[in-house]
Image: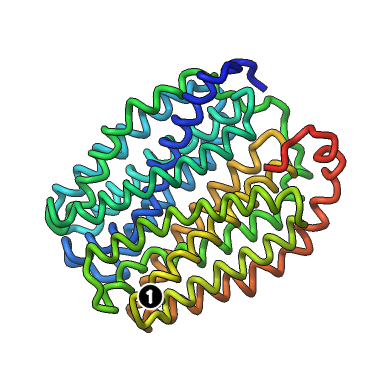
Amino acid sequence: MSTQGKSWPALAALVVAVAVGSAIAHLCTSAMPFLVGALINGYGMSATGAGLVGFFQVGALAVSMILIAPIAHRFKPLRVCALGASLAASCNVLIYLAPAQLALICLLATVVGVGYGLILTAAVAAAAGSSRPDLTYAAGNSGALLIIVPMISALSLATLQFGSRGTFLAIPLLIVVCAPLLFGLRRTRGTVAGAQVAGTTFVKGVPILAIWSLFSFGTGGMWAFTERNGVALALSGPTIGLILSTSAFTGLIGTSLAAVCSTRVNRVAALAVGVVGGGASCLMFALATNLWMFATAAVLYWIFTMFVYILLLGTAAVLDPTGRLGTFGTGCERLAFAIGAPLGGLMVDFGSYVWVGVGAAIACSVIAPAFLPGLSRALRAPASRLATGVIAPL
């Protein structure tokens, strides 16, 4: 582990940079409802076409993370982040200016996704190379949630200021405004632990990767069309934006509960509650008949998704203290989200929004829990290392 960044000011700067970088990268998925709305209204796309664009963007983020993870420690995080931010910002502007051609927009969205993937990889690598990686990850994720709230609020207003395609112009502006805060990444080498991960680690990691992917697949497919659900309820654009943005703040409840449960409650039992609750929130989204039901679903969605996300990160750290399983899992999570978007579009075009909610509930609440017994068995081996304090619970 890197010994750099031991001073609290340096660590604080790193935490801020990790939080900002994570928030920008998570626009790839958190902003998906607004991207889908912009593609349908601004380019005249079908739900399937909009979902396909989302698939290429989120899929590129996932694949880029998976491919670069083994060698990320060879590069300075700030340079990786700068490259990613440049790609994401410039190609979003090009999408804003582009004609309504699905192939071209998918190509540009792919490059945007690679940019997001580089930003998130830099944040993960920098945190892993800090003197307190556990603290950096926990504080960084909480900070990212706080930053995402005003970001999503800005996206909801962008349509009023820049037209139906405004989301694609607002994102580059947000990246430029946040860029100075990313310089904290240069305070660490961002090196990942050099020990090679044994093949058995990945074998033990299969259950958690399956749970991670299925949960993201279900919740991602639903989240991509939540804005359309609000429109179907005849809610105004600003109202939908307010609900989806402010509900993200309640994700802090989920991160806090995860921090408590990881040390006081059985991890597997906590994950069971989380994945089932996440599936139920997706079903509530699809079945919402009024403003309050829609808002309640949004709040529960963020609480359960962040609760599960933090628990999965912590569990991955228990199984693999080098952090590579966590990085790989994050890539798999984003890839599953990418697949969920176009499949959700197909369900909408050939069925209804209810189909998306039912599919999400099945993936999260029925299939994902089937892998919990395997995860429980995998956790028994590193239990002694956790008990001796070699790795933090989160």
Q: Quadrant of the C terminus?
A: top right
Residue 380 located left or right of residue 246: right
Q: Position of residue 18 (x, y in %)?
A: 48, 33
* SS assignment at label 1: helix
Disc 1 marks a residue whose amino acid type is: Trp
Query: What residue is drawn where x is 26% and y is 65%?
Result: 239
Residue 129, quarter of the rendered image: top right
Q: Position of residue 106 (x, y in %)?
A: 29, 53
Up-down relation of residue 56 to residue 179 (above or below): below
Q: Position of residue 16 (x, y in %)?
A: 45, 31
Q: Residues within 10 Å of mark 1 (few under 14, many from 20)?
A: few
Against 83, residue 147 (above or below) is below
Q: Residue at x 79, y 32 (%)?
A: 390
For this rendering, which residue is in front, 283 or 91? 283
Q: Is residue 267 above or below residue 225?
A: above
Q: Residue at x 77, y 57 (%)?
A: 266
Quarter of the image where one finds residue 222: bottom left
Instruction: State the residue position of label 1.
Output: 292
- Residue 131 location (% of width, % of height): 63, 23
Which residue is depicted at the point 43% across and 27% down? 80
Instruction: Tally the numbered discs.
Output: 1
